[in-house]
Structure formats: structure tokens, C-alpha cells
Amino acid sequence: TRDLIVGTLIKKSGLQLKLTSRKTVDEDGNKIERVYCRIRAPVSLLEKKADELNYRLQFRPEVDPGPDFWQVQKPGIQDEEEKFVEIKNEEKLLVTKAGAAEHLEQMYKNGYIHASEVHIFEDEATPKHWSRRIRTLERIADKIPSCNRWNPYADFSTRPTERHLYNEYASVRGTTIFMPKDRLYLTRQILENIFDFAVLQRVEVIDSMFPLHDSNYGEALTTSSFLKTWIYPYMGDRDKIGAPYLSHPANDNGSYCPWVMMPWAQPLSEIREYFGESVAMYFAWLGFYGYYLLIPAIVGSGMQLLYYYGIITHYDSSGIKYYMVLFSIFMVVWANYYNMQWTTEEKICALAWGTNGFEDAEGNRPQFHGDTSEAWWLCCFGEPEQPRRLSQVTNQWETYYPPHKRSMKTVLNMVAVSMMIIGLIIVISINQTIEHILVDDLDLWWGLYVMHVEASLQIIVLGKLYKAWVEEANEWENHQTDSKFEDAKILKTFLFS
């Protein structure tokens, strides 16, 4: 099996694989030999996959330096058309192709551009096309400062005329347009197009699959760097520990986190670069929520002090706790205020991290498949339709799965979840009855402890069984995108929790 998997990956993926073995001891004390397969994706393969997926990458800041750059006003000029000097310069065309080529050659000799950017490419058919690229390369060479807080994103393209637009990041192998989380995501997509490794792990063909973030010493982001800037922010530099939420100015380069905010500070940009947007978004929400909880905490503590010193009483003459009524009203107002603020912060995160509109342009999951025959007891589903069909929108062949079948499967799974919840309620009732008999009727001192241990084991066992069922049930529903798959999984998990 191992040789088949490795051989298929080498033949079909273009990935670089290296096998190593290590002798170890299993849980039963037996000596076994574990085989590790390290996988590396060449940059050219990552770029090809990014182009295929329309993967969004961030532009360089010099591509669009912002309104302060374009709207530089020329002194003494009142005419509106003459005020914007840089826009006028941008419209100046290098008319001849020979002149443009000579200009690019000079920039290359001065060390401003790479050798691959010297040429006038075939798809640069007019002076407007090559002039626009040259002006952008000039701004990049001059390192024009940008007034935009966050640079825009665009779908990646391998076209050489657009290669210079994307931001570059330092790594141990030189500059690259991919962050660590980009390389890991694209590599995983390449792997999942060949094998469903989640299934292979479930049937124990492979033990585990994990990213080697620190495989290259010298990377800027490591677990050690996070220990100083995230876990123990007081140990790190104040200009690197971030802030409780992304929109805070302390997240900008060269800005310092205020001392009072340091307990809630977290380097969200680095978390996103290392772990990806989904993990970063979770901690962005967690930090924002924790920071805003200071408001009810301060108000609640103040009311507790007033009660402690007798300024407010426990009950009034009618037996009503008016201070609790006021605090409840305050919490309702605070909850609405927090929700409004988080909605704004969420949109800022989407803008800063390039995830705005991500679900609308999201591609198919590697595990998504067309319509197939179902089990005999699902005869109500009818005969399977064609697994591939011609899209009426794009006029391209696409994988198709009938939405009504997915809806029927979702309903069946929800019925199953409801039955499990009813069964759980019955089990809890039985436990409480047994506890009552042991403790109250039989007066056994150890009865309460036994039932607590039983309840703990019940939570662990049922949780593992339910988690395994959720994985299978979610795969059975055959969701088209990762976002819809995760949403359905979260809903099932939440209902049983």
C-alpha cells in the first residue's frame, strides 16, 4: 500500500518526496519501524495550482500607493485637471516597443528588476499595456510609500505580465510570493486531488498527516517567536506583540501596543501567516470578545462593591432586585453594541486578509463527487443523474450533484441527531435515577462518586462515537465547498453539545 501511494504521488503530483524510517516502540511495548514521508512542493507547482484555483494573493503596496500619492497637488495650479501630477505621469506612454525595451534594459542594469521582467511580452499588444507595467515597476524600484493600511488582493495568474504585482516575503530560500500558510494550503490541495488522506487515516493506512512549519531553521515565524509575542507578550517587543483586535493601530508596522492592552495583545497578522485565516479569525474574535468583556466586568464589579458596602440592598420592600434589573438591561444594550462592533471588525478582517467574498468564489472540495447510486434503502432518491453536466452559466463541463438529494440527506441526518439527543436525555435520566437510589434510598456514601466517574466516562465515549459519526455523515451529504462542509459539521457538533 505504501509503495502504491508513494508511487502514485510521484507519478501524478509532481511533488518531491523523501522517505525516512525510524524504529520506535508502540503502546504495547513492541518494537516497530515507522516510515515518514516528507513532502515538498516546488514553487512552479504551487504557482500552477494557485492559478488553477484562482487563489488570492496580496498586491505590493507600490501597485496602488493610495489617494495621497495620486492626488499630489502641484503648487500654484488651480485647474482641477492639472492638480494630479502623478496621474498625468501615469498616462504618459512609451510609444515605441524599442523604447520600452531599452527602458527595461536600463532598469535591469541598475538592479531594479529581474531578468525575467526585461522583455516586452506577447500579450502586451499596445503602448498602454507595456507602459502601465513599466510605471508600476518604477514605483516598486523607488519604494514609493503607501498610505493604504491594507493592500488589495487579486486572483493569482502565472502570466509574466502580472508576476511583478504580487507581494514578496522573505524566507530561508529567498523571496517568495507565498506565505507559509499559502504553501501548506496549496500543497494540501495537490495531495487531496490524488488521495483522500482523511479516509486513509480513518482506515489506518497512514498514521497521521501534519505540516512541518519549522522544517527550515531560520524562518521568521516559529513556535519560539510566538512564545514571546503571543503566549508571554511582556517578554516580546511592544511593536511586535500586536493588539487585542486587528483594527487597532498597534497592529501597524512600527506602532506600539499600549501597556494596558498588553494582557490581551496577540500578533494576529503573524497568526494568520502561520496558521491561516480560519485560525486567525477565531483568535481575532476571541481577543475582541475578551477585550470588550472588560465593560460588563467593570460595571459588574462596581455594582458588587456598592452591594458589599450596603449602598444598594439585596431586596427592596417589594422583594425586587432593582439593581439586577438595571444590570440585565445594561447587558442587553452591551450585547447589541458588541455585536455591531464585531460585525465591523469582521469586515475589516476580511478586507485585510483578502477573504471578502471568498465563499462566492470558492472552488470544489477534492472529495466532492457527482451523483452516484445510493443504498437500496434509499430508493426514494431515484436513479442517479449524470455526474458531469454542461454549465448554463460558464458553458464548461462541471461536476454535478443534485441539491435535492443533499437536502434529503441533511434532513435524515438531522432526524438522526434528534434521536441521539432524545437517547442522551434518556441516559441522563437513568443516571439521575440510579444516583438517587444509591445516595438517597440506600444511603451509600460512594454512590455519588461512582456516578460522577460514570458520567465522565459517558461523556468521553459518547463524544468520540458522535465525532466519528459526524465525519461520516458530513461526507455522506457530499458538500461542494469546504465552507459548506465546515458549516454543516459545526451545526451537527453544536446540536449535540
Image: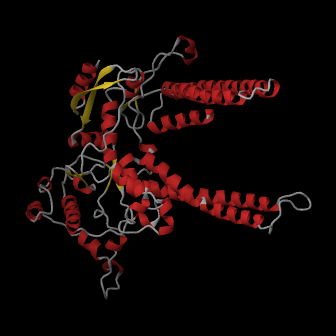
Q: Nearer the viewer, residue 236 or 480?
A: 236
Q: Nearer the viewer, residue 314 or 23?
A: 23
Q: Residue furthest bottom?
A: 76
Q: Nearer the viewer, residue 386 or 106?
A: 106
Q: In what quadrant of the picture does the C terminus appear?
A: top right
Q: Is residue 314 above or below residue 6?
A: below
Q: Is residue 427 above or below residue 245?
A: above
Is 338 situated left or right of 147 in this image?
Answer: right
Q: Is residue 122 above or below residue 136?
A: above
Q: Residue furthest top?
A: 376
Task: Report the residue at 70% width, 66% height from top.
Answer: 302
Is 171 situated left or right of 94 in this image?
Answer: right
Q: Residue 84 appears in which quarter of the rendering?
A: bottom left
Q: In what quadrant of the picture does the N terminus appear?
A: top left
In x, y percent, where is residue 49?
Answer: 28, 39
Is 274 situated left or right of 170 in this image?
Answer: right
Q: Is residue 136 visible?
A: yes
In x, y percent, where is residue 111?
Answer: 11, 63
Q: Residue 314 appears in which quarter of the rendering?
A: bottom right
In x, y percent, where is residue 96?
Answer: 12, 63
Q: Is residue 244 visible?
A: no
In x, y percent, where is residue 86?
Answer: 27, 73
Q: Nearer the viewer, residue 442 or 97?
A: 442
Q: Residue furthest front?
A: 445
Number of numbered discs? 0
